């Protein structure tokens, strides 16, 4: 009996020595599984694809160098087509079947609002979604972190700055009829209230719409002199093209969701003069620093395509994850990662990203955006960070 007991203890010791360092979902001795719910085929696929590619590029670099504490990072991408119903199924699949350790850069406010409860209720990290909605960091939750300035904050600051500096008297709003558009509306209304003004007119469109002629006609009839756009790339181009087609030269200001090289590439002359909120500069090769120029060349070689600001954001989000996982150490769990991120500070980099800082009391890493304008077919920054 004594011999049998000794054998059993020895066997258990061997199992303990050979077991993974962490028993957290999505982590074993060889890999870390990261999930993302994106749009690769729907109305904002032109954003989702470069974000995915940017993340893949950073993770590939890390894996080629031996991974994070010996673990390879495996990115599992689910295409929800910007459809909340499909997104829910995708999130459940990533949680249950793929056992994702964390979700990074989920794409689109309707998708994020539908999937975030599933993710955090399963005890998984919900990191840096492409939805600057206050619900992504408030109320404070141990697993929710956001690094993009919120729609409300930056659109309040941008609208107020534009009206004060340029003297607009009749501000109007064209918005997507969902959580994204409504959050932008609140920021615009707050800005105007601080200036003792009101929103003169507002009109909405359904997600994925391409014909905005009736909305533009309504705004023109209201004699707007500034139109704020809670739109994405395709709808931004459609709105400005329609306005120019009918001879209406009104100024327009779009959220960061329309701040993309695709906007001027698709819109051409019709979008000249468009104002937008910038989260970081576009990676134009002309005038780039040596590190950025080298990164652009690596991206081109990897994907046979030109990078844009969404590629950069995907890359930098993946880098934030890598740096935090490395700082957490070999004993990687969701709780340990979150506690590490709460004391991390990320300084500005060669992309021109803002500095990010998280604390135990504040899971929003940045609150500010900058104004830019399309001039001669490219975005030009025209302000510092707005307060």
Image: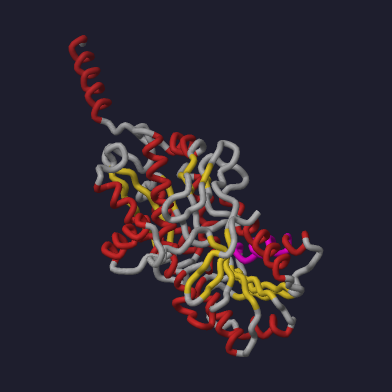
Residue lying at 56% horizontally and 70% vertically, measured from the top left: 373
The image shows residue 229 at horizontal and vertical percentages of: 61, 71
Residue lying at 28% horizontally and 45% vertically, measured from the top left: 72
Colour scheme: secondary structure
Q: Quadrant of residue 157?
A: bottom right
Q: Quadrant of residue 193?
A: bottom right
The image shows residue 201 at horizontal and vertical percentages of: 73, 75
Taken as a whole, is the magenta stretch helix, strand or loop? helix
Q: Is residue 221 above or below residue 235?
A: below
Q: Is residue 377 above or below residue 346?
A: below
**Drawn side of residue 164 relative to residue 10, left or right:** right
| Viewer-side residue, 223 vs 202 | 223
Query: Where are the magenta residues, as a range?
Result: 179-190
Q: Residue furthest top?
A: 2
**Drawn side of residue 114 relative to residue 89, left or right:** right
| Viewer-side residue, 174 vs 75 | 174
* Quadrant position of the N terminus in the picture: top left
Q: Residue furthest right?
A: 196
| Viewer-side residue, 219 vs 338 | 219
The image shows residue 244 at horizontal and vertical percentages of: 59, 86
């Amino acid at each position: 009996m004594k011999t049998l007991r000794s054998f059993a203890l020895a066997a258990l010791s061997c199992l303990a020595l050979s077991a993974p360092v962490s028993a957290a979902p999505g982590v074993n001795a060889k890999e870390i599984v990261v999930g993302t719910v994106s749009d690769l085929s729907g109305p904002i696929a032109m954003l989702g694809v470069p974000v995915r590619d940017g993340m893949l590029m950073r993770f590939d670099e890390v894996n080629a160098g031996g991974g994070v504490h010996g673990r390879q990072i495996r990115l599992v991408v689910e295409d929800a087509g910007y459809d909340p119903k499909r997104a829910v199924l995708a999130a459940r699949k990533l949680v249950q079947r793929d056992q994702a350790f964390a979700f990074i850069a989920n794409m689109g406010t309707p998708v994020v609002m539908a999937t975030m409860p599933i993710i955090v209720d399963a005890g998984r990290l919900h990191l840096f979604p492409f939805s600057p909605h206050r619900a992504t960091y408030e109320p404070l939750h141990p697993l929710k972190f956001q690094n993009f300035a919120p729609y409300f904050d930056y659109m309040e600051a941008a609208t107020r700055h534009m009206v004060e500096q340029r003297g607009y008297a009749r501000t109007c709003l064209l918005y997507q009829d969902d959580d994204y558009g409504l959050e932008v509306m609140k920021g615009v209304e707050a800005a105007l209230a601080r200036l003792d003004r009101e929103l003169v007119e507002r009109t909405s469109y359904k997600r994925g719409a391409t014909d905005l002629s009736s909305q533009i006609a309504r705004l023109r009839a209201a004699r707007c002199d500034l139109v704020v756009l809670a739109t994405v790339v395709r709808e931004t181009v459609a709105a400005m093209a329609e306005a120019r087609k009918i001879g209406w030269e009104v100024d327009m200001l779009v959220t960061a969701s329309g701040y993309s090289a695709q906007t001027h590439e698709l819109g051409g002359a019709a979008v000249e003069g468009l104002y937008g909120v910038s989260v970081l500069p576009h990676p134009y090769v002309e005038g780039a620093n040596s590190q950025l120029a080298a990164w652009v060349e690596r991206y081109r070689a990897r994907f046979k395509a030109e990078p844009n600001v969404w590629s950069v954001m995907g890359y930098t989000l993946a880098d934030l994850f890598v740096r935090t996982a490395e700082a957490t150490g070999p004993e990687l769990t969701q709780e340990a990662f979150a506690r590490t991120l709460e004391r991390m500070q990320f300084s500005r980099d060669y992309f021109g990203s803002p500095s990010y800082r998280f604390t135990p009391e504040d899971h929003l890493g940045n609150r500010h955006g900058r104004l830019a304008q399309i001039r001669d077919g490219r975005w030009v920054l025209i302000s510092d960070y707005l307060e």
